[in-house]
Image (cartoon, rainbow, N blue to C red):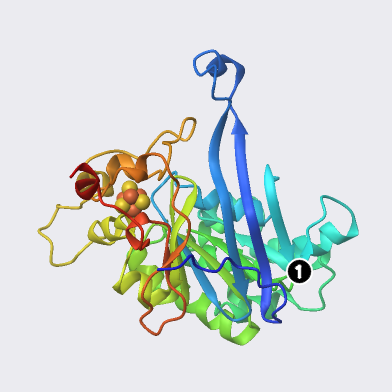
Amino acid sequence: MTAATKPTASDTTDVVLEAVGLTKHFPIRRRLRTLFAKQRAVHAVEQIDLVLRKGRVTAMVGESGSGKSTVARLLAQLVRQTDGQVLLHGDPVRAKGRRFRAYCRRVQMVFQDPFASLNPIHTVRYHLTRALRIHRSDATAEELLTRVALTPPERFLSKFPHELSGGQRQRVAIARALAAGPEALLADEPVSMLDVSIRLGVLNLLRDLRERLNLAILYITHDIASARYFADEVLVMYAGQVVEGGGGEAVTQHAAHPYTRLLIASAPDPDRIAGAEVGVADLGGGEPPSLIAPPAGCRFHPRCPHVMVRCRTEAPPRLAVESNGDGPHWAACWLYDANTVSAEEAAD
Ligand code: SF4
């Protein structure tokens, strides 16, 4: 197999947002520094390349602590990257000034907890009209509520966040994001705090907005099943790195990377015996690694059932795997390198 092509997609017109080599290291505090004298930072996100396109949903899937929410915050410029670039229509984002404000209008974020993201002392009308005023939009609060299917809008305008259900609150948060007239929406676990019965409605709303407004959506989730339902493309994150990517169907139905396979095996299964929820740790025989001193080579090697000699020292590049007609499919795994010598063979 050959090395997969990296996203250098700014030349194509449907690309809205692009990350190239995006890296974030959080310096550790002085008290901890004495304990970890040689390692001075948490390597939260390392060399992420991704492309968000008009009218497409890209899902970023991984366990808690894999760095996926940090990627969303980096793209929203809520935190600054240590290295790498964020490009909007091919232009690198500026740190301040008029162009930065324009960037913030065009790239909006929807947070996991709609109750925390809305001010409890203000009404829905206040939240929406304030956002419209800040972004100098000609739309009205009524139009925004109609766009997120909170109708009739008059019924919701004077309500406070605590008078709404979780799903309605998240719809108001989405409406507020739409007030800016964004081109890209970064949805960080937008349904994980909602009741199971209303998750589908919010996902369908996002899908509908993607089609009607031609939005580029990044959908951050730990639930690979919802990624399959909702996303055109899926990226799998492990320990701060993207380890597999491809079409939604290809990654979820023909997973190539051993970590993705474990993630799928650990997803809730209605046929499994009640109470037997299985985590990746149960299936992989271990916990995710420390990001202060990540493992050398492939970061998944301490947990991988297929670990080989070279996995412990050499970090695998993106390698193309057989495509199932769902676009390019790749995995950062030595199993897909034609020159790989298995640990058994090497030992012979
Ligand atoms: Fe496992 Fe090696 Fe592939 Fe990493 S590179 S996932 S350790 S087989």
Task: Please indicate, yes or no, whether residue 341 appears anywhere in the rendered image.
Answer: yes
Residue 61 occupies which quadrant of the picture? bottom left
| Image point (46%, 76%), residue name | 328
Q: In the rendered view, tell whether residue 213 sits above or below residue 193.
A: below
Q: Position of residue 145 (x, y in %)?
A: 62, 76
Q: Nearer the viewer, residue 248 or 303?
A: 303
Q: Position of residue 263 (x, y in %)?
A: 30, 57
Query: Can you identify the residue that label 1 sits on?
Result: 90
| Image point (56%, 56%), residue name | 111
Quadrant of the snapshot with the N terminus = bottom left
Q: Is residue 182 left or right of residue 44?
A: right
Q: Secondary structure at mark 1?
A: loop
Quadrant of the snapshot with the C terminus = top left
Residue type at tag 1: Gly
Q: Position of residue 23 (x, y in %)?
A: 62, 46
Q: How many marks?
A: 1
Q: Position of residue 74 (x, y in %)?
A: 64, 51
Q: Residue furthest front?
A: 348
Task: Please indicate, yes or no, whether residue 201 appears anywhere in the rendered image.
Answer: no
Q: Is residue 85 left or right of residue 111?
A: right
| Image point (70%, 65%), residue name | 107
Q: Nearer the viewer, residue 6 or 259?
A: 6
